[in-house]
Image: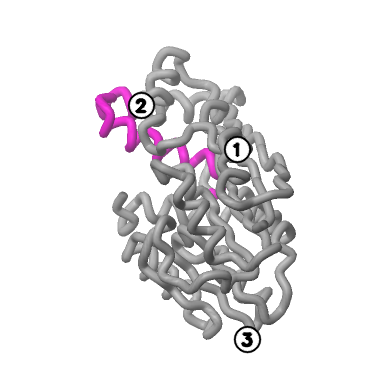
Amino acid sequence: MDFSGDVGEWQRNVSEGKAGKDRRMKVIEALNIQSGQSIIDIGCGGGHLLKELGMCVGNKGHVFGLDNSPQQLDNAKTYCSEYDCIELIEGNATDIPCATEVFDGLVGIQTYEYIKDVGPALKEARRVLKLGCPIAIVSILWDHCRFYGADEVLNQAIFEAFKAHCFHQMLPMELSHLLPDNGFGSISRQNLSYIETTLHAGMAGFYLSKLMALFATTQGVSETKAELWLSQLAKADQEGRFGFVNFPVLTTATAI
């Protein structure tokens, strides 16, 4: 995906909004980060979590951001430029270019649902984590993510087209067996779901609707229908009947 244009801007806006801030806060709480620790962010994107992790570990700690997109790494480099403790690495989750058992915590926010074969990626996560240290994964129950206010048939067509955007629509459910199979125990889950009833800049649904409409046009939905869907949502918002429901789940486990 090209993150240099609108898509990158939409993603940054979601990260900077309330939903993005809330889930980063929950991740940091779950990792129980201490000053001086080494943490790795898998699929670090534009670096919003990296900066907050850098604040937590301080100058004596280290934060590594891994991403396979040079564009995203460039964005992260700019966003985190004042933090010497942050190091950016180009690579992927199934082959992390780091030594074995070196990290005190590992996090992936909306990363693992985009990996076709999650098992090897989790096995690699376990390899780089120290014994007894936590992994935190935020992934979305995409089957339950919904917009309300548009024509029902058109709404369903957009959602069906959007399913192709990732490999795992319900990864939080799959992690129940994938984590134990790859060296993790003490699994817990935290519901991070939220509802939005307005459609405007600053809200996650505002940007996700644009992303979904754009992606749908790559899956056989005409631009005319995608634009009609967006206009129907906007009209619903004006009439006070718009809704957006999203179901992120924070799954945590311990390296055993």
As drawn, 141 above or below 98: above
Quarter occupied by the C terminus:
bottom right
The residue that disc 3 covers is: 59
Q: Main secondary structure of the magenta part?
A: helix
As drawn, 29 above or below 59: above
Residue 161: give x, y in percent of width and height. Answer: 36, 26
As drawn, 128 above or below 176: below
For label 2, the SS is helix
Compute the Cα span from label 2 to label 3: 45 Å
Mark nearer the N terminus (2 vs 1): 2
Q: For marks 2 and 3, give the one nearer the viewer.
A: 3
**Could one spot residue 207 in this view of the protein?**
no
> Is 26 in front, or is 90?
90
The residue that disc 2 covers is: 161
Residue 104: give x, y in percent of width and height. Answer: 64, 70
Quarter residue 102 falls in: bottom right
Specify whether residue 222 is painted magenta. Answer: yes
Q: For marks 1 and 3, give the one nearer the viewer.
A: 1
Q: Residue 177 got which mark?
A: 1
Amino acid at the residue labelled 3: Asn
Mark nearer the N terminus (2 vs 3): 3
Give the side of residue 183 with respect to residue 219, left or right. Answer: right
Which portion, as a residue range, is magenta?
202-226
**Could one spot residue 129 in this view of the protein?**
yes
Compute the Cα span from label 1 to label 3: 37 Å
Amino acid at the residue labelled 2: Ala
Give the side of residue 146 with respect to residue 222, left or right. Answer: right
Mark nearer the N terminus (1 vs 3): 3
Crowding around mark 2 (Cα neighbors within 10 Å: few <14, some 14 to 19, many 20+) is some
